[in-house]
Amino acid sequence: MWQVLKNRWRQGFRTAPYPDKEPDFPERFRGRPVPAENGPGVDLGKSLFNEDALQDRPPAVIGYSRDYRMAVSRREDLLLMKEGLKLAGALDQKIKKLYGRSLKLRAVCAGSCNGCDSEVQALGNVVFDLSRFGIQFVASPRHADGLLVTGMVTRNMETALKKTYEAVPDPRIVIALGACALSGGPFAGSPQTRDGVDGVIPVDLYVPGCPPHPYTILDGLLRLLGKLKEKTPGRKS
Ligand code: SF4
């Protein structure tokens, strides 16, 4: 027991000081793409954040920045031009009053490769400690305020997703997470998928990435709940 306490003391406080302090990222981190000058822009909903995008001719992406903030409220806002992004705004006052201090989410894997789900799981570790913001995952949609959906929505999961959505009491929110959930990702166009969540149920927050970094997810969630100090644009319905 004494050894356990000693080790715990030595480890110190591990939780990141985010959002009071900007996060650090490893060298290999790929954040928001840098669109080419006079290019067609980058659809973050489809972006896989890989090297291949840099080889396209004419190039749409010339590199990746270290900016992790990418979550938006509307699908059309995912088109990144050189002017930047219209980041997600807070929920309207009525919903914010309900969920601002306690948000329960039901996670639904609608056909993902589990990469996105692993990043969601990481949000629960001591570094990110999602529950300090009052956000927790629950086992039943009937106990949830909203859904967090990963995966492109396979035909096999379409009915299950609709039924899970209907089981969440109103007002409910939906978060689509990762390129697959936003557009079908690498599986877009397959007859076995619905190419993203918003073709099946309405979406309130789009979080790009393949998979999104936990800080990108956290930033989107805190924007949605109006918990970030910086000014965010209002949510449009
Ligand atoms: S977006 Fe990428 S990491 Fe997430 S489920 Fe799709 S392929 Fe996997």
Image (cartoon, rainbow, N blue to C red):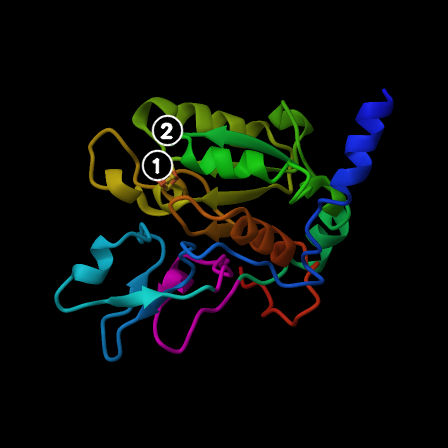
Residue 27 appearing in the image? yes
Q: Secondary structure at mark 2?
A: loop
Based on the displayed image, in which of its 4 quarters is residue 77 positioned? bottom left
Residue sitting at 25 percent across and 54 percent down? 51
Q: Magenta-highlighted stretch: main secondary structure?
A: loop
Residue sitting at 35 percent across and 76 percent down? 82
Residue 221, above or below 102: below
Q: Count up the numbered dots.
A: 2
* Residue 76 within the segment the image draws in magenta: yes
Residue 111 tag number: 2
State how far apart marks 1 and 2 are (Cα).
6 Å
Describe residue 173's horizontal placement relative to residue 197 as left or right.
right
Please name the amino acid that badge 1 sits on. Answer: Met
Image: magenta residue range: 67-87
Residue nearest the viewer, comparing 219 with 138: 219
Residue sitting at 61 percent across and 69 percent down? 232
Residue nearest the viewer, comparing 13 with 174: 13
